[in-house]
Image (cartoon, rainbow, N blue to C red):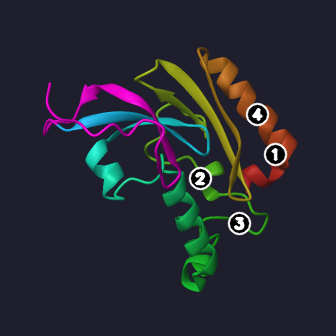
Amino acid sequence: MSHCIDLTHQRFGRLVVEKRAQTVARNGNVCWLCRCDCGKRVVVEGYALRKGITRSCGCLRREVSRQNARRNERFIDAQGGALVNEHGIGYSSLIRSKRNHTGVIGVSFDKKTGTYIARLMYHGRYVLNRSTQSFDEAVELRRQAEQQYFKVKEMNN
């Protein structure tokens, strides 16, 4: 066994090393199982931990990006521009795209899982994002969400 610095119980940014991972990096470096402050577990190469390259499971990057987006006026101005109508309903939730193969707006088929996914975005957030085995059930979920979040009349305009 090659020389290895034991990183167990050490903290690197938001990550605390729990134990050595069974996997080894392509270059032969030792990997470690770490728990992030957010609760997620990740396997990270020891070199990346020691050099400060990896400091979280990815939650830190998402938080920094979110904060930067809130401060960036050009980014804020671009949000909600031509992508939503005056009621805050995304056009993707109103208009059937060329890529839609199910024939129902907001219902798609996931080939990987073999399930239908019903989605509805309202005011920039998914208020419906569920998968089901049945096409009819996905259509019904979408219809119920439309009734709950906006009038059917708006859909036809």
Placement of 89 over or under 65, stated as above or below: above
Q: Earlier in the sequence, mark 1 or mark 3?
A: 3
Q: What separation in Å lies between label 2 and label 3 (alpha carbons)? A: 10 Å
Mark 4 element type:
helix
- Counting from the top left corner in percent of width and height, residue 57 is at 48, 46
Question: Of the residues shown, which amino acid type is indicated by label 4?
Answer: Arg
How far, Cα to Cα, is label 1 from label 3?
15 Å
Q: Residue at x 44, y 36 (%)?
A: 42
- Which of the two discs, 4 and 1, sits closer to the camera? 4
Q: Which contiguous range is marked in magenta?
A: 1-28
- Say the numbered circle drawn on residue 143: 4
- Is label 2 in contact with label 4 (beta carbons under 8 Å)? no
Q: Is residue 55 magenta?
A: no
| Label drawn at residue 152 | 1
Residue at the disc numbered 3: 85
Distance from Cα at disc 4 to Cα at disc 1: 9 Å
Q: Amino acid at mark 3?
A: Asn
Q: Nearer the viewer, mark 2 or mark 1?
A: 2
Q: Identify which residue, 51 or 105, lies in the foreground.
A: 51
Q: Residue at x 86, y 41 (%)?
A: 148
> How busy is the neighbourhood of tag 4: few (under 14 within 10 Å), some, or many (20 plus)?
some
Quadrant location of residue 82?
bottom right
Q: Which residue is mark 2?
A: 92
- How many numbered marks are there? 4
Does dot 3 land on a helix, a strand or a loop?
loop
Q: Residues within 10 Å of mark 2 (few under 14, many from 20)?
A: some
- Provide residue 86's location: percent of width, then percent of height: 76, 69
Q: Quadrant location of the C terminus?
A: bottom right
Which amino acid, by three-letter code, is at mark 1?
Val
Viewer-side residue, 137 vs 3: 3
Give left or right: position of 80 versus 87: left
